[in-house]
Amino acid sequence: MNNHMIQGYVVKGKEIFVGLEDSKRTWRLSVRCDRMVIHQASMEARYPVLLSYLHNNFPECTINLIYEAGFKGFTLHDRLTDDGINCVVIPPHLVTEPKVNRVKTDRRDANRLAFILEGKDVPSICHVPDRERREDRQISRTLIAVGKDIIRTRNRIRKLIDFHGIEVPFAAKATWGRKEFEALKKIPLSAPLRASLDVLLSLLGHLWLYQETLRAHLKELCRKERYRKAFDIARSLPGIGWYTAIRFVLELGEDLSRFTDAKKIASFAGLTSREHSTGETQRRGRITGLGQGFIRSTLIENSWVAIRKDQALLAKFMRVWRNSGSRQKDIVAVARVLIIRLRACMVLGRPYATGIVR
């Protein structure tokens, strides 16, 4: 039976489930209906080609499509949704395979995606922010990337100085500020070293300028009507300044009710413990570390300030300290409480109130 006969007798007017395995140049598709694979295809990774395939082969069907979140972001989701196709984006680490499986291909991955979508066995789907927030939060993410480039360039400069034995009066300082790096421009050096150092210093200067520009854009977003209320609530938490508050709002969103309980937002931030338990044996390890690393690290960093401003958080810190004796575990516990309280404040729509220990 050819493809057209299959569509005529099996698929027409029914609901189909499409698994799409995304790559840079090609898309691999697996189509399921009535608990069986009815078609498989490979095509150029261009949206008009995909849309033509779906409309021409399944014109009277309700189309559901699933793909893994990847390097192309959520643009495909937006375009499919605009064209009336139900689209689900799933985190790659949640697509499971049998332990005995030793073969991995795009075809198998597409089949697996279609299978779990048809069986309603999707463990968790990605929250897809709208285009405006995705574009706004790119400012924050670019700023993070520029900050890493600044650290990398500063280290290159210091390594160059150490490698060639260049003596500078402030070499003993643990950290160098802009004043020290500016002073390097006046140190007498040979022509090759001067050329190399000047390039790195020029690059560092441009990165500092880009950093200031991006921070100015972030300050403008703090005053944007859409984010103002959520920003004010996040800003009210102890230990969180304007810079951290707007980054949290851009990453987590203005409405955190999609996290139906405290455990879910703590898990999203990677602040829940790993567990390998069976029978009567319980084993818990370090935190999972899932999600955006900078959210977790920023929360932990701000928690050190928060425990000096909120008695309830300090009491939590001391209670965990008595049980564990580990400062790392203590501050992670406080960070977990902090993001849970952020969710509660966002859902209730009111600013944070510091706790009192009686």
Image: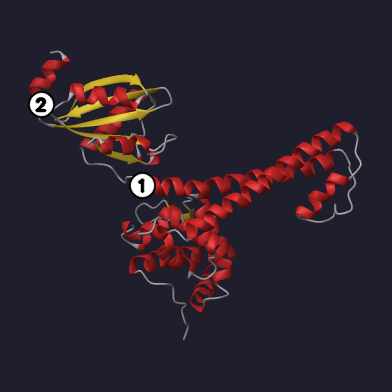
**Residue that appears at 46% across and 79% down:** 355
Q: Amino acid at mark 2?
A: Lys
The residues bearing labels 1 and 2 have C-alpha atoms spaced at a distance of: 33 Å
- What numbered label is drawn on residue 158? none
**Residue that appears at 27% across and 26% down:** 51
How many marks on residues?
Answer: 2
Q: Is residue 290 left or right of residue 185?
A: left
Q: Identify the mark nearer the N-term, 1 or 2.
A: 2
Secondary structure, mark 2, is loop
Secondary structure, mark 1, is loop
Within-10-Å neighbours for mark 1: few <14, some 14–19, many 20+ = few
Viewer can see residue 260: yes
Viewer can see residue 273: no
Residue where numbered disc 1 is placed: 130
Q: Give the x, y percent position of residue 162.
A: 84, 43
Q: Nearer the viewer, mark 1 or mark 2?
A: 1
Q: Is residue 174 above or below residue 65?
A: below
Within-10-Å neighbours for mark 2: few <14, some 14–19, many 20+ = some
Q: Nearer the viewer, residue 200 or 121?
A: 200
Q: Give the x, y percent position of residue 186.
A: 88, 46
Q: Is residue 96 left or right of residue 175?
A: left
Residue where numbered disc 2 is placed: 12
**Residue that appears at 74% across and 41% down:** 202
Q: Give the x, y percent position of residue 30.
A: 26, 25
Q: Nearer the viewer, residue 329 or 62?
A: 62
Q: Amino acid at mark 1?
A: Asp
Q: Is residue 219 above or below residue 117?
A: below
Q: Quadrant of the N terminus?
A: top left
